[in-house]
Amino acid sequence: MDLLLNIFSDYTLRIVALGSALLGITSGAIGCYAVLRKQSLIGDAVSHAALPGIGLSFLLIGSKNTEWLLLGAFISGWIATFAIGKINRLSRIKYDNALAMSLAVFFGFGLVILTYIQKIPNSNQAGLEKFLFGQASTLLQRDVVLMGIVAFFTLLPIIVFWKEFKLLSFDPNFADTIGFSTKKLDILLTTLIVISIIVGLQTVGVILMSAMLIAPAVAARQWTDRLSVMVILSSILGAIAGICGTFISSSIRNMPTGPIIVVVITIIVFVSLLVAPNRGLIWKKIREAKNKKEINSNRILSILYALSVKHDNPYHPHDLNTIIHGQNRVKHSKKYLRKELKKLKISGLVGEYESNLWAINEKGIDKIKGLDYIDRGESYHA
């Protein structure tokens, strides 16, 4: 309760929480396209490639003006993505290899520039290293305003070009066939991804920004099959991670905000992987166990049907030994078989005519005839 009250009373906490939420919304929305287009590592490459742009921008203007530093980071990051695309198209080097090369070269160059800047006798160079790991606590009101403007002009093209981006993500060949310029759309979408990454460098830093781009989208993908729901949910999860990370870091002494935000969104991804319906690992195991039981029951039922067609009376009962020997490749103990037969009896598919003598009934025969994997009267195929 005290922490919630601090939201309204602590100016710094409000600013940092709002900035983190804007970052989560922006990166969450645009990250969906990176995930769907299988470009998840683009966030890592762009965020690392932004470092030399920050250093060169500082050398040119001689001050730590956030707008100029982020502009330099944007130019450097965009050049890196352009170089990755060109290398992939004009050579035999695959996309992931080109991405790794670009990441290493640009990040190494950026570290060289930062090392050089640290040796310059200028007091203004202190603090540039915050872009490596982020320093959300240093966000100012003008930084949040800038993030809000960037978020607006990043999300607006997603709304305007919704159908075009959707086609580009799922079927670029069809989009090209019906007349859309996939090359221009790709450049626009890549530019939006670069912008969303650059705007978060001050909050979570070069090292961790890729997680903010990808993790919310990965978590949202577990819960839905619709792009619109995925984008909205990803933005919400990103905002939740930003706000919760800010609150947690503010309540623990000397706890950095950026890494905590990444930890929170990682926990959200982990929970989504486990409990999300349809795709969650827990539900998947439950469905597999249920399907296995259903298959075993159908196999036993199919054996009773195969035995029944060999008699003039289709409802001729058989003992457990006969049923077991009729299962060909699959063997069950009598205890298990009796248990499954009782379940089939409760379902009204078989009947027990005498002690441990079982036969399929009319309802069971109708069900067997509706199963595709049954070779009626002779055997079954699993």
Image: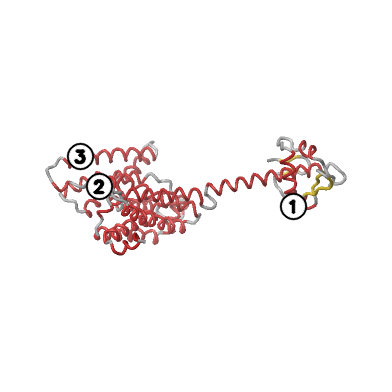
Q: Specify the quadrant that holds the N terminus.
A: bottom left
Q: Specify the quadrant that holds the C terminus.
A: top right
Distance CA(mark 3)–CA(mark 1)? 77 Å
Give the residue at mark 3. Answer: 115
Whether tag 3 and tag 1 are in contact, CB under 8 A, the answer is no
Classify residue 381 as left or right of residue 188: right
Q: Earlier in the sequence, mark 3 or mark 1?
A: 3
Single out the residue that lies furthest toward the right: 312
| Tag 2: amino acid | Lys
Distance CA(mark 1)–CA(mark 2)? 68 Å
Q: Nearer the viewer, residue 32 or 264?
A: 264
Residue at disc 2, secondary structure: helix
Position above or below: 21 against 102: below
Give the residue at mark 1. Answer: 346
Q: Nearer the viewer, mark 2 or mark 3?
A: 2
Q: Position of residue 154 (x, y in %)?
A: 34, 58
Circle 1 Cα neighbour tier, 10 Å, few/some/many (<14 / 14–19 / ≥20):
few
Q: Nearer the viewer, residue 276 or 89?
A: 276
Q: Nearer the viewer, mark 1 or mark 2?
A: 1
Residue at disc 1, secondary structure: helix
Whether tag 1 and tag 2 are in contact, CB under 8 A, the answer is no
Q: Position of residue 38 (x, y in %)?
A: 43, 46
Q: Position of residue 31 (x, y in %)?
A: 39, 52
Q: Nearer the viewer, mark 3 or mark 1?
A: 1
Point 29% across, 44% down: residue:
49
Position above or below: 156 against 280: below
Give the residue at mark 2. Answer: 130
Q: Position of residue 310 (x, y in %)?
A: 84, 41
Circle 3 Cα neighbour tier, 10 Å, few/some/many (<14 / 14–19 / ≥20):
few
| Tag 3: amino acid | Thr
Q: Nearer the viewer, residue 234 or 32?
A: 234
Q: Earlier in the sequence, mark 2 or mark 3?
A: 3
